Image (cartoon, helix red, strand yellow):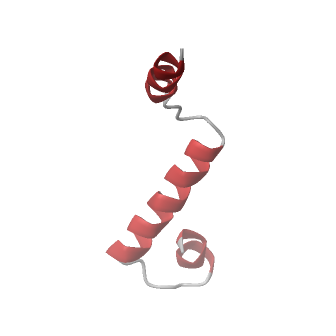
């Protein structure tokens, strides 16, 4: 949606910004740029 705004003269709405942010956040979490190590440590401590 941001690329459509930049190159195709589409309207930039709050929904477009929000959805682009969610997609970016999801990609960062999947690629472990943003990690939840505290959640993993708590999970491994319960198993031991």
Picture layout, residue 6 above or below residue 11: above
Quadrant housing residue 21: bottom left
In the picture, measured across the screen, residue 38 lies left or right of residue 29, that is left
Determine the residue located farthest toward the left in the rendered image.
14
> Is 15 on the left-hand or right-hand side of 30?
left
Query: How many numbered dots are placed on residues in this image?
Result: 0
Residue 15 or 45: which is nearer the viewer? Answer: 45
x and y percentages locating residue 42 in the rendered image: 44, 22
| Vertical relation: 32 (above or below) 23 | above
Asked where in the image residue 14 lies, by quadrant, the reply is bottom left
Residue 1 spot, x, y in % from top left: 54, 75
Q: Residue at x 42, y 77 (%)?
A: 12
Residue 11 against residue 25 in the figure, above or below = below
Residue 38 percent location from the top left of the image? 44, 23
At horizontal 57% and vertical 72% (from top left) the residue drawn is 6
Q: Position of residue 2 (x, y in %)?
A: 53, 69
Split into 4 quadrants, where in the image is the C terminus? top right
Residue at the limit of the structure toward the front, as seen here: 48
Image position of 4 with respect to 17: above or below: below
- Determine the residue positioned at 36% across, 78% down: 13
Closer-to-camera residue (12/47): 47
Asked whether 1 or 31 is in front, the reply is 31
């Amino acid at each position: 949606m941001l690329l459509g705004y930049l190159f195709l003269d589409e309207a930039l709405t709050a929904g477009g910004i929000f959805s682009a942010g969610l997609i970016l956040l999801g990609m960062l979490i999947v690629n472990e740029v943003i990690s939840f190590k505290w959640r993993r440590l708590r999970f491994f401590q319960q198993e031991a």
